[in-house]
Image (tube, coloured by chain):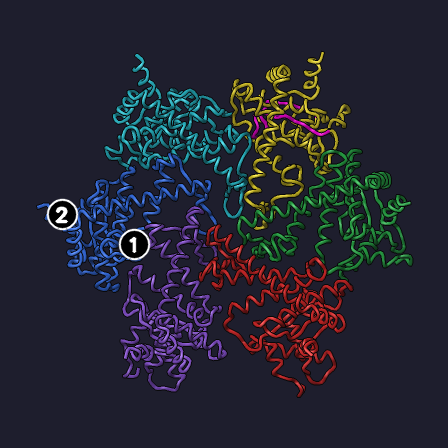
Chain colours: A red, B purple, C blue, D cyan, E yellow, F green
């Protein structure tokens, strides 16, 4: 292990990792540093391994066209900008337009410390972050692409949980909806039983849509007010493809000067 | 077995335990006292084993932040205060903000004697106790966290049973709704068949919501009236992490002086 | 077999028993009398075995509190009183507040002869008997307990059958609703297919509720008019725990004097 | 085979029997005549075997009370009378109040020749015959028993088929509803898929109810007009328990004189 | 193979037959001619085998009554007449009132050449042909029999496909409804998932009913206008039981003279 | 490999092909060229193999009638013309009226470069292309055939995805509907759970229909405006059966002159 390895940074990027996860991570890092012909494992090897573990391997072969690169840059910059501006979000560790797994780009956002309780405000801000990519595409290019599909699925799931599992919706009140049942046939299967009336289903639908609409407005407002930061972020992303936390935050400090 | 072991207290904390359960409990206590290098099993070993059996092992590694500790303290104090103030509840045996199993903290509340019949009033008070944590978070911090999720699930289930299994709702009357059927495929599975009309489903939904709303109001009223006791409880909990029955009740006696 | 065994009484208490059932019953009685160190099987051994076979073993360990005993006594006396007063019911053979199986107490009511046809009036009276325990609890204690849960399930099932299987409801007419289908997967499973419209489902729901409401009113009227008999029955039950048919009927004869 | 065996009568009572069925029937008859210590198979042995094959064995042990016998007699006489009076029904071969299989009594009604096409009018009359027992009970005793349950199920099924399979309902028109699908899991299972809208389901429900209501009226009218024949039939049934075709038809001839 | 065998006629009656099907057909024909003690396979052997393959074996034992024969004749003549009069139908090859498989009679109608595209008009005429038997029964006898059941099922299926699979309904437009999913459990099973709203289900129901109603009107109009041809056809059918294409067409030529 | 093989063209026609796919393709081409008695693999062998891999083998035996050929030509020309005229579509590589797999003809349309993000406008144009065959048939022949069935299924699926998976519908907003669940019984099975209310289902239905309606209008407008190109295309198709990209584009250039 290289002596310059900063364990604090690594700890910040691996919240929720168990001992086994961490040992597995170091193994990956060792393989990576070996592949890079190094004698010691360096900080960069470990950080790259963290992402590999969290998001899947980089897909360099997955080459984006110039137009797609620009869309992806605005999409990821959208996520990152909203995350940076809202108070109840985790700090952005990295923004990238290099494909990983299924995604064209990604924004890595990790909590500073382990959390066990999540307040409503955190979820509300998270919804705005999730909608950030979609709204940036819409604002800049006038139309959206399929690139936001996964964000929308996550946002819908989160909005549904806020309402049906966490009792955080004023209209539906502090109760739960939809009992999960595990069907132990041949595989693990969790099926949600609709244990409420059609009228309640309609109310849940309305409230999900309302939460998403609010998140859209929050995102749009920030994207409009901070348009300059957004453009700067996009330029940097297209130039460097990946921005680490320091480089990312520097962009905002520049502006402030 | 240490001669100071108070069997009465142990009996109070193990209602519904069968002979096999009790023998199993003493086994756990023996292992615990051995691990603690004792020659005899002491009262504390048995009591700790009771909780281990009921709630799962303590999770000391699960470290809460200062903010989370404060939220958890108000949450558990909320449960305990409501349980203490309402007439048809079991006495609070212990309140704690040490994580056990999935929960950030817990309030142990056990009946003085075995019960075979549960009157409606007991369930109505239990609903208020279940909502106590949620309402305390809302009242003190202005918003709730995911920590109440399990309480809400339990409250919803209980409210549903009051209406659909026990015939305790005036509007829906003394009948049952939803025949349980056991599906004996490969595992044990109990599936509830919706054997009533959509209109009835709506009425059930309304009445569940009404029961929960009433429980919220009861909880809020107590939390407001007894705010000083709540704060004192929280201070003690943050200081000691765990309050046994005596310490818990002392807080209220102090006040009365 | 003791020569004092009254085969007529035994026959009355075992309607619908097949030859195999009867032989099985005598076996149980032989075991019981042996356990009681008798050389012959006496009447009491056979009668006790009948109940064991029908209701499960007595649960003496299942000790009720004074309050629970009183609730149970009013509950069972409620059933027994309604059964005694209504014309189309079977005679009460025994009332007891000793726990058997899941029930806190029980009322044994058996037909004088085997029946193959059940008229509507018999079911209507049976509904009132089933609601008798619930209404007695409500009337005397102002609220009900979970003790009536099973009665309500039986009443709901019976009301549903009256309407959907026996064509005995004026509004829904002489037809059946809900085809039973046997699913022969791995166990025996009877699933009822909803083969009617939502509007019909609503009407069925309304009529079930109406039948139950009528039964409530019938029960309430008798409980109010015969309050003295009810209280006497309860006193006897608390004193003796179990009333056989003769003792039960004596209470009403006393009154008549 | 006894030389007096009338093959024509036997043919009339075995419509739809295949060669294998007939050979099977003769086997049953041979066993029966042997059990009756005969050297040849007589007409009566074959006829008894036909009923055994069609309806299950007689249940002599299944003894009806006087009241039940009277109800059963009116019930069966109801079926038989309606079948006799309506034009599009098969001739009544036998009426009986001896239990067979699940039924308290039975009315045997067989077509004179094999049929391959069934016109609407035949089904409409059959519905009235099926309702005949129910309406007779209602008319005579003021209330119905569970004895009509199976008739109502058959009537409901037939009414549904008239509407959904045979296109014989003016309102729903010449189309089918509900595709049958065979589920070939582990047993043979026919599941009907609801392939139409809720509104159509309501119309089907209304038309089934209408067909049954019409059948009720037809039955009631005949039972009222021919009350004397009904009573005579009942008297004969109670006296003889079983009426063969000749004896049955004689009752009506008497009247005509 | 007999030298008089007309391969053109055989080709016309076997559209869609693969090489294997044809070889199989000739095998059947060889067996048939052998059973008929011929040395060569004649035209008639092959044609009979075609029907055997398509419709199942003749059921001579299945004897119709005079009344049933008349109904069947009008039913089949109804199909054949409509098929002859409408422009977008395949030529009638044969009409018969000899039972085959489940059907009391049959009308064989085969395309002149293989088709790969089916226009809407072809389906609309086919619906009228399918309703032809039903409408003929209704028109002549005033009521319908169960004999039309299969036609109605086919007509309903076809009408549904026109609307939901082929986009040929103006109201529902050029889209599909109801995704088929193959359930590969233990047998082959195709289950149609209802992937549209209840309101759409209602519209589909209305349009199916409308298509059938139009087909009824078309059929009725032809049956009324060409009543003489219908009666002639029926007379010939009752006399000869089966009419081959030539004999069938001759009836219409006669009329024209 | 023949030296005249133009790798660029092959690359254009194989977007999304993996290394394994490409190696597999060359294998097919080698077999094809061998069957054609060539010593080297030529361009044409590879291109034919591409289509074989993508669309299934040609079905020369599947002979269309003159009328069907004309319908197919207008159908395919419809697709191709719309694809050529709209801005957000991939270039047409080939149009053919030779049957392949289930289809009577086909239009091969491939992207110039690999795409990872698909904007809404691309899908909107694709819907018009899919409807192009249907609208051409309707416009020219006054009615449609079953040949459009597969196009309509694809269009419906795409419209549904636009709305429920990609958040591209203004009315339903940026959220997803219908969680996919994998049922891992015995085969791979993806079942879509309806996790929204009936009212939402109705809105989804309306919006799908709206998208399709818009696509119809777009298609109709182009078909009307460019009727001459359409007719020319059809003439060429009937003459040559297949038009490669160059020949296809030449038709439009001619016109421009």
Residue A206 in the image: x percent, y percent? 53, 55
The residue located at (57%, 61%) in the rendering is: A214
Q: Which mark is residue C148?
A: 1
Residue F135 in the image: x percent, y percent? 73, 40
Q: Quadrant of the C terminus of chain D?
A: top left
The residue located at (75%, 73%) in the rendering is: A240
Are marks 2 and 1 in one subunit?
yes
Binning the other alpha carbons within 10 Å of mark 2 as few (below 14), some (14 to 19) or many (20 upward) gives some
Q: Are marks 2 and 1 in contact (CB under 8 Å)?
A: no
Q: Which mark is residue C251?
A: none
Q: Is residue E95 magenta?
A: yes
Which quadrant of the view contains residue D129?
top left
The residue located at (34%, 81%) in the rendering is: B44
Q: Which mark is residue C252?
A: 2
Query: Is E48 above or below relative to E255?
Result: below
Report the front residue among C28 and B77. Answer: B77
Residue E131 in the image: x percent, y percent? 60, 27
Query: Mark 1 belongs to which subunit?
Result: C
Element type at marker 1? helix
The residue located at (27%, 40%) in the rendering is: C122
Q: Quadrant of the N terminus of chain D?
A: top left
Report the front residue among A217 and D136. Answer: A217
- Read off the magenta span: E91-111
Of pointers 2 and 1, the one earlier in the residue sequence: 1
Query: Mark 2 belongs to which subunit?
Result: C
């Amino acid at each position: 292990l290289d002596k310059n390895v900063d364990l604090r940074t690594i700890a910040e990027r691996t919240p929720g990792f168990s001992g086994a996860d961490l040992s597995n991570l170091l193994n990956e890092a060792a393989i990576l540093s070996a592949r890079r012909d190094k004698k010691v494992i360096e900080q960069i090897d470990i950080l790259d391994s963290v992402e590999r573990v969290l998001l899947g391997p980089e897909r360099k072969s997955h080459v984006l066209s110039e137009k797609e690169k620009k869309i992806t840059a605005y999409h990821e910059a959208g996520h990152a900008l909203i995350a940076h501006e809202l108070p109840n979000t985790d700090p952005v560790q990295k923004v990238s337009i290099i494909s990983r797994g299924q995604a064209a780009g990604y924004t890595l956002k990790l909590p500073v410390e382990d959390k066990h309780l999540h307040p409503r405000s955190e979820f509300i801000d998270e919804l705005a972050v999730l909608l950030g990519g979609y709204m940036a595409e819409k604002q800049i290019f006038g139309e959206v692409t399929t690139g936001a599909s996964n964000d929308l699925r996550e946002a819908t799931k989160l909005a549904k949980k806020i309402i049906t599992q966490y009792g955080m919706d004023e209209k539906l009140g502090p109760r739960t909806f939809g009992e999960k049942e595990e069907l132990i046939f041949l595989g693990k299967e969790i099926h949600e039983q609709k244990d409420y009336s059609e009228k309640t289903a309609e109310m849940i639908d309305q409230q999900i849509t309302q939460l998403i609409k609010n998140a859209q407005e929050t995102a749009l407002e920030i994207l409009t007010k901070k348009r300059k930061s957004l453009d700067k972020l996009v330029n940097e992303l297209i130039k460097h493809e990946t921005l680490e936390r320091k480089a990312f935050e520097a962009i905002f400090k520049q502006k402030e000067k």
